[in-house]
Image (cartoon, grey):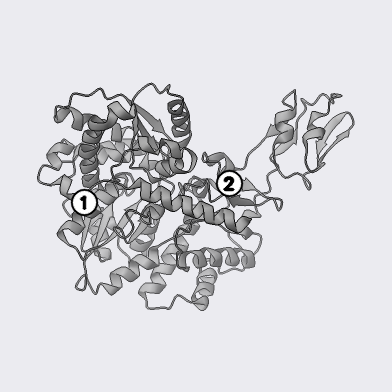
Amino acid sequence: MRKFESNVQYTKYLVNREMAKRFLNGEKMNAETVKKIGETISPGPKPNTRCCIYKERHILSERVKINLKKQKKDENVIKIIRAACDECPVYRYVVTEACRGCLAHKCIEVCPRNAITIIGHRAFINQDLCIECGKCHSACPFGAISDVKRPCLCSCHADALFVAEDRKVYIDEEKCVSCGACVYNCPFGAIVDKSFVIDTLDLLKKSENNTKYKVYAVIAPAISSQFTNAKIEQVINGIEKIGFYHAVEAALGADMVSCHEAIEFADTIEKRQWMTSSCCPAFVKYIQKNYPELMSHVSGTVSPMIAIAKMIKNTDKDARIVFIGPCTAKKMEINENDIKGIIDYAITFEELNAILDAMDIDVSKCDETPLDNASYYGRLFARSGGVSAAVEAAINEKGIDVDFQPVKCDGLDECVKALKVASFGRLKGNFIEGMACKCGCIGGAASLSHGPKDVTEVDKYGQLSKEKSSVQATRIFDIESLHLERDYKKVMRKRRNKKETIEENNQ
């Protein structure tokens, strides 16, 4: 068994593996099975991670229920398990030794809950009354009130998490971009991403060994840094052993995107002034929700996942497709109004690992299945800077006379800064490469491993390619016939209608 980065990741793995095992053994996914899964993972008599086995089993059962519940239209895949969140009692605002006991008492004046009193010439915060609004922190002239954020709040650069009066964390759905940073950073596993393991296995089962319809797996290029105990060709073979008809590189879709985006950039940059990439769904969603007026600057090219899926369906109209990657936001992207139905399900590398182990497939012992001919640059999409490099290479190879000045944003915090600068017309460049995760897709919330070392693995993966450029890799495809354009007006119209409905219901 591989080494896991944390007990939280290991618990997620155990839940997904146990669900997959029971489904493959023909068990019905009902309340009794949910209970059995909790008891199997936490047999007792002592708990593994919680105060008692009963709370531990309850939280495990909640995880299973979230995974089994049918996804509603537009429902967020990022969820919070209330019982688990209760284990994170961090006092965010605390008065430090720097407090001078001043006469102004501005902290007391701004507190909406009368949670601050003066004791012994120093301010004191009653944590039972504090709602963590931060007004005292901002008002203190000495900066004597510290702000210690919970790990989940620190990780969310979309500012989509907040602490309510019950001191538990909640998601502001109007701000959340489903990047999954909070899922990865919550030390108690209270924030989870809905799994589609059972949906995927059911899709494969109903295909009757790919005779009724063929099920294709589209593999994100970030997979090159995930299974370091095996060759990438062995991993592809292992994926096909699960039951997929064929495993296709999303990197080939990235090559299509590079070529398409290069032409789009050249044709529109004079009017736009600057343009952003569109391959990261969390980055695009952040712009939709926070800077809708800037959507005209977002590339209208589909993501590599959608591009390669369109190519597959162009040759096999009955094909069913499952995307496998490190990204929780992809689970939301596949249901966007203008591209819904192209991808059936999106699962993560964590979920893939659980399925492989549930089926006793050891990728290090698998045969080698040849890779598709994605290019070096297409595979580089997995890391920060890869998109810019690929588009620039396509521009140069096509001989397009245009000034390409990329601004590479590594993480949503850098994306936010770049967008603010661009909105004021002060961007030092004309192409924003937006990656919501640090290091790019290889730093995705649902990756099996996170770290700078993964960048070198992506580069090695790229060097294995027979095709050295996106133009060469796509020369046999009629890219224009695939219609690789997004209809953001349709997406934004749906978002406006949803927002208006929510506002009407709140009135």
Q: Secondary structure at mark 1?
A: helix
* In the rendered image, the vertical position of residue 295 relative to residue 242, given as above or below: above
Residue 428 horizontal/vertical position (percent):
38, 21
> Badges 1 and 2: C-beta atoms under 8 Å apart?
no
Q: Residue at x 78, y 38 (%)?
A: 111
Residue hosting label 2: 161
* In the rendered image, the vertical position of residue 60 relative to residue 324, given as above or below: below
Q: Nearer the viewer, residue 106 or 325?
A: 106
The amino acid marked with disc number 2 is: Leu
Residue 183 horizontal/vertical position (percent):
51, 50
* In the rendered image, the vertical position of residue 143 relative to residue 227, given as above or below: above
Q: Which mark is residue 201?
A: none
Q: Work out how far the residue at label 1 is from the one at label 2, CA to CA, in angstroms.
A: 40 Å
Q: Nearer the viewer, residue 288 or 69?
A: 288
Specify the quadrant that holds the C terminus: bottom right
Q: Residue at x 43, y 21 (%)?
A: 426
118 relative to 132 in the view: left or right = right
Residue 433 horizontal/vertical position (percent):
35, 33
Q: Secondary structure at mark 2?
A: strand
Q: Is residue 10 visible?
A: yes
Q: Is residue 448 visible?
A: no
348 relative to 463 in the view: left or right = right
205 relative to 476 in the view: left or right = right
The amino acid marked with disc number 1 is: Glu
Q: Residue at x 66, y 60 (%)?
A: 51
Residue 266 horizontal/vertical position (percent):
23, 30
Q: Earlier in the sequence, mark 1 or mark 2?
A: 2
* In the rendered image, the vertical position of residue 469 relative to residue 331, given as above or below: above
Residue hosting label 1: 233
